[in-house]
Image (cartoon, grey):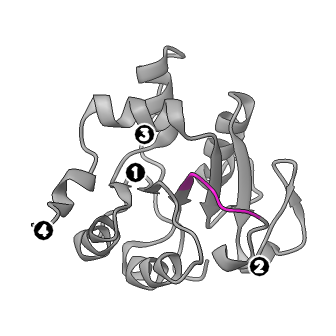
């Protein structure tokens, strides 16, 4: 009997709510330091609501961000995480899927930020039994589903520029 990998693609409010309630530790792939950047203020919001944030960005490795030391790669994280939240352009997602699947542990969820979608990378992760959310912002989903109200600063959290 083969597993239906599509059940790991989370597209409904019940699935999103379960993730937001069950998962408490989030690695932020593509974390940034600018307060006006979605890759900064979305994790800051989540941290303020009780989530533990572990930033990942090779350009910021070693620096403090969201009360944690930034690491260069997911493999450098000090511990497994529940969610890998991705703030990277869609064309980089196949490589990040490789990186995630090569880890000695598996996150429960990989969450592609609003405006970020790559169906091939999502399928590879889902086939490995990892729940995948595409094209959603954790901040407005948290507000909408867990009662904090509001949106993602009025719009999408866009993918970062190519050089990041």
Tags 2 and 4 in contact by the CB under 8 Å rule?
no
Question: Earlier along the polypeptide chain: callout 1 or callout 3?
Answer: 1
Horizontal relation, residue 158 to residue 1: left or right:
right
Secondary-structure class at tag 4: loop
Asked whether 154 falls inside the magenta stretch, the response is: no
Which residues lie in the magenta part?
Answer: 79-83
In the picture of the structure, the residue carrying the numbered disc 1 is: 114
In the picture of the structure, the residue carrying the numbered disc 3 is: 155
Horizontal relation, residue 49 to residue 126: left or right:
right
Most foreground residue, 163 or 50: 50
Horizontal relation, residue 150 to residue 125: left or right:
right
Residue 75 position in % (x across, y down): 67, 78
Most foreground residue, 30 or 95: 95
* Placement of 22 over or under 112, stated as above or below: above
In the picture of the structure, the residue carrying the numbered disc 2 is: 59
The answer to whether residue 34 is visible is yes
């Amino acid at each position: 009997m083969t597993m239906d990998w599509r059940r790991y693609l989370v597209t409904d409010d019940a699935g999103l709510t379960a993730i937001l309630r069950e998962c408490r530790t989030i690695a932020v792939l593509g974390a940034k330091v600018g307060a006006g950047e979605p890759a900064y203020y979305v994790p800051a919001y989540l941290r303020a609501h009780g989530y533990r944030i572990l930033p990942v960005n090779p350009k910021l490795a070693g620096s403090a961000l969201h009360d944690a030391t930034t690491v260069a790669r997911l493999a450098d994280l000090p511990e497994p995480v529940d969610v890998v939240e991705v703030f990277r352009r869609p064309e980089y997602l196949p490589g990040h899927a490789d990186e995630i699947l090569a880890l000695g542990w598996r996150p429960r969820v990989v969450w592609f930020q609003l405006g970020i979608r790559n169906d091939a990378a999502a399928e590879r992760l889902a086939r490995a039994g990892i729940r995948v959310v595409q094209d959603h912002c954790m901040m407005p989903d948290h507000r909408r589903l867990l009662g904090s109200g509001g949106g993602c600063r009025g719009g999408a959290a866009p993918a970062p520029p190519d050089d990041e």
